[in-house]
Image: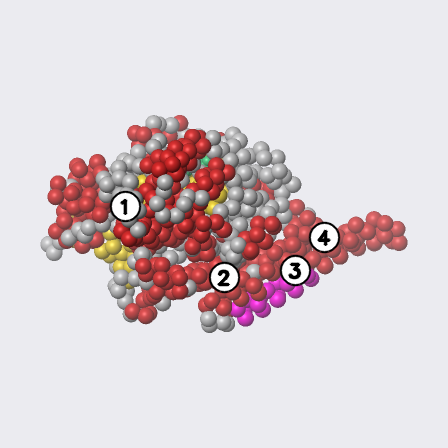
């Protein structure tokens, strides 16, 4: 679609649909095979087995699976479903599904609706077309999807979707969900062990996640007129609009009615699917918005985020929008992220990162709080690697999102508490010391947190009163990746913590709370470098972080090296989250993804330069030349004064075109060279260091040409047209 056609197309608007205004709670989880429906559709034996699989990860045998599939089928058919699919998360980052009809033919030609335990439990998609990082070659095995009973099945449109893991026949994870489930199992075990110091009744600890999804909405017709948005999800060229986000008039402003109608349709669909969306508002940049749900158990929350992104694309489409999840769709204005709020919750209903009303509750809080700090300190580089991607590289450290350096913000008051605890004496505590600690340090935490309002927006990992908020996660990303690493490192630290405390109790005969204080004091001492409450955007912090020996990995190929370090391999092995083969494979897939990403951007940019921008500039040059020679013909020698401007523009355009073409040629050469490399790590680094830097340089000339060429002739929809559609 050409630019002007696209602009006229964008005026076809959809009206606000009154029918959609309905009580949200009445819609909630109607399309989900949740506890209520299970009670209704399953035998009590099947129901109990599924419940225990959810609680303790116990296996479901074939007989029970047959019963569950019967019930699930009956429910799904009652909801109007005609097909079922295993819904999974291959390492492409998107979700995948392959639909099969319930319909089947018997040998006598009679049609029936069929869905057995076999189809519920295991399926074999054509795995060869999904990235595996060489796992399947190594093991010559195919991949299969296996039912994850901890995330309930749901009906979307006319399909029953069954959340599944995707693994090779030898059991290696080919997806993001399998490692996450293992990490969640690890943290459950480790945290339950520690929580039992404080409450013997705790049987299970769930990691909780509440994400905040940022996104842009642009007009669909306009998006279709831009090859770069269509193919890469971002604009590779485009001059900033005269008005950007300077006026701050968009942030928390009135939501435009067309957007509101999209949001309300989206929220209705989310409700049906059991995604507990709650908050919506405008974000900082024009056309940027945010949506946040009530937090949930992490695995479910990750699934809901992925499902949400799929649903959003679809609903945006029917509302004449395209939704952009890319971390940096537009230069010069803020990009998008996805804060991950994380905590730990017991089956007794306690948030372990929430201070309580008694000193004992607060000691529990401090234990989980300080252990998390220590874990992040030990594995800061690994945590950074979990949010690395080609598109997120644009955002981290660009002074709109946290830097690539991991650090933790705890705030002034909690810093003071940690400082005081550091002074606790080693070994046994005197009665006075104990009273002082309990009353004046630990006991006062809830009070100080009440007015702990200093929020540092520049911190990548901030404590926000009753949870940690991980802020560097990319808007497009699958939260499973950071959640796997975070839960794994904290699980490891909690396990170590318990061992150390138990040793002090057994060998040094310390009381439990003395032992806990002793270990915490050591953790506070040894993890100080990770705590930083200052300005994370400043240059000073980069220097200071270097002194503290914190990593500052600015691009993906460098950032993901650590995935296969000796320490990472040992960590993932000890927690049984990933083995060495899986780590190497996942790293390889990440590198591949990176290469494809930059490769595609390079190609599209080349296309824009040669097939869109240059032809437009030449056309305008010709128009000006025609004008110059016409004036010369009519006015003779007197034309000089009249053609000065035209000639100047012609020359300027010539200069930019020459420079732009030269750069595009060198970029293409660099691309060819990188492409020929066989080592994937070197190849990714070459794309990063030798190809990508040309993108910005080429863009400068392209954007300069945009300012020179007549608006009428410019072939690409401009920023002001993309960003201010109401
Ligand atoms: P903001 O960060 O914008 O100030 P809130 O503090 O209200 O907003 O919460 C942001 C997100 O934190 C929400 O998505 C919410 O679900 C999530 N959240 C709140 N408590 C927890 C928790 N215990 N565990 C995980 N996420 C939580
Ligand atoms: Mg937030």
Q: Residue at x 28, y 53 (%)?
A: 507
- Dot placed on the residue nearer the N-terminal end, 3 or 4: 4
Colour pattern: secondary structure
Where disc 1 sits, the SS reads helix
Predominant SS of the magenta segment: helix
Q: Are marks 1 and 4 in contact (CB under 8 Å)?
A: no
10 Å crowding of disc 2: few (<14), some (14-19), many (20+): some
CA–CA distance between discs 1 and 3? Answer: 60 Å
Which numbered tag is attached to residue 627? none
Q: Position of residue 345 (x, y in %)?
A: 31, 40
Can the viewer see residue 430 in this picture? yes
Name the residue carrying label 3: 660
Picture layout, residue 192 above or below residue 600: above
State which mark lies toward you, 2 or 3.
2
Q: Position of residue 122 (x, y in %)?
A: 22, 56
CA–CA distance between discs 1 and 4? Answer: 75 Å
Name the residue carrying label 4: 623
């Amino acid at each position: 679609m050409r630019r002007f056609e696209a602009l006229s197309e964008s005026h076809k608007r959809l009206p606000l649909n009154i029918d959609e205004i309905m009580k949200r709670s009445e819609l909630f989880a109607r399309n989900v095979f949740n506890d209520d429906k299970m009670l209704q559709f399953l035998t009590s034996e099947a129901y109990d087995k599924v419940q225990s699989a959810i609680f303790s990860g116990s296996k479901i045998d074939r007989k029970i699976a047959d019963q569950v599939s019967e019930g699930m089928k009956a429910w799904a058919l009652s909801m109007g479903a005609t097909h079922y699919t295993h819904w999974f998360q291959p390492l492409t980052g998107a979700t995948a599904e392959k639909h099969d009809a319930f319909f089947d033919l018997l040998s006598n030609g009679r049609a029936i609706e069929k869905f057995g335990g076999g189809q519920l439990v295991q399926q074999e998609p054509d795995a060869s077309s999904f990235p595996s990082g060489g796992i399947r070659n190594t093991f010559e095995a195919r991949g299969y999807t296996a039912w994850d009973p901890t995330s309930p099945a749901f009906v979307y449109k006319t399909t029953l979707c069954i959340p599944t893991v995707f693994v090779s026949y030898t059991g290696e994870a080919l997806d993001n969900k399998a490692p996450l489930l293992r990490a969640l199992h690890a943290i459950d075990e480790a945290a339950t062990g520690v929580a039992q110091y404080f409450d013997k009744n705790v049987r299970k600890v769930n990691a909780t996640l509440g994400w905040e999804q940022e996104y842009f909405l642009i007009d669909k017709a306009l998006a279709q007129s831009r090859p770069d948005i269509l193919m890469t999800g971002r604009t590779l060229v485009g001059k900033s609009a005269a008005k950007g986000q300077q006026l701050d008039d968009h942030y928390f402003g009135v939501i435009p009615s067309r957007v509101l109608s999209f949001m309300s349709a989206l929220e209705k669909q989310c409700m049906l699917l059991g995604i507990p969306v709650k908050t919506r508002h405008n974000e900082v940049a024009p056309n940027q918005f945010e949506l946040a749900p009530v937090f949930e158990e992490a695995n479910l929350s990750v699934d809901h985020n992925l499902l949400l992104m799929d649903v959003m694309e679809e609903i945006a489409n029917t509302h004449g929008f395209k939704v952009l999840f890319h971390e940096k769709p537009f230069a010069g204005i803020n990009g998008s992220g996805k804060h991950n709020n994380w905590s730990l919750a017991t089956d007794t209903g306690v948030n372990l990162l929430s201070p309580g009303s008694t000193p004992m509750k607060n000691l529990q809080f401090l234990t989980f709080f300080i252990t998390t700090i220590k874990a992040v300190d030990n594995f800061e580089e690994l945590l950074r690697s979990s949010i690395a991607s080609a598109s997120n590289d644009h955002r981290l450290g660009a002074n709109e999102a946290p830097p690539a350096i991991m650090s933790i913000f705890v705030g002034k008051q909690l810093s003071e508490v940690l400082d005081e605890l550091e002074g606790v004496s080693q070994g046994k505590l005197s009665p006075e010391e104990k009273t002082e600690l309990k009353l004046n340090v630990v006991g006062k935490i809830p009070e100080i947190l009440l007015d702990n309002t200093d929020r540092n927006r520049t911190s990548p990992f901030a404590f926000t009163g009753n949870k940690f908020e991980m802020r560097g996660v990319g808007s497009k990303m699958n939260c499973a990746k950071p959640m796997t690493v975070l839960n794994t490192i904290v699980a490891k630290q909690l396990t170590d913590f318990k061992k150390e405390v138990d040793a002090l109790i057994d060998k040094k005969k310390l009381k439990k709370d003395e032992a806990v204080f002793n270990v915490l004091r050591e953790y506070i001492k040894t993890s100080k470098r990770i705590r930083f409450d200052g300005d994370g955007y400043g240059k000073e912090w980069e220097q200071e972080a270097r002194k503290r020996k914190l990593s500052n990995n600015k691009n993906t190929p460098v950032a993901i090296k650590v995935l296969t370090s000796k320490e990472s391999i040992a960590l993932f092995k000890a927690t049984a989250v990933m083995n060495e083969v899986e780590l190497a494979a996942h790293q390889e897939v990440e590198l591949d993804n990176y290469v494809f990403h930059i490769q595609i951007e390079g190609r599209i940019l080349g296309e824009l330069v040669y097939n869109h921008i240059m032809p437009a500039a030449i056309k305008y040059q010709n128009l000006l030349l025609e004008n110059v020679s016409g004036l010369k013909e009519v006015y003779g020698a007197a034309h000089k004064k009249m053609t000065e401007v035209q000639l100047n523009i012609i020359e300027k355009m010539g200069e930019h075109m020459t420079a732009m073409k030269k750069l595009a040629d060198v970029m293409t050469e660099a691309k060819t060279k990188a492409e020929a490399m066989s080592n994937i790590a070197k190849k990714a680094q070459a794309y990063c260091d030798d190809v990508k830097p040309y993108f910005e340089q080429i863009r400068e000339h392209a954007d300069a040409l945009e300012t020179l060429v007549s608006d009428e002739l410019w072939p690409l929809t401009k920023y002001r047209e993309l960003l201010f559609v109401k």
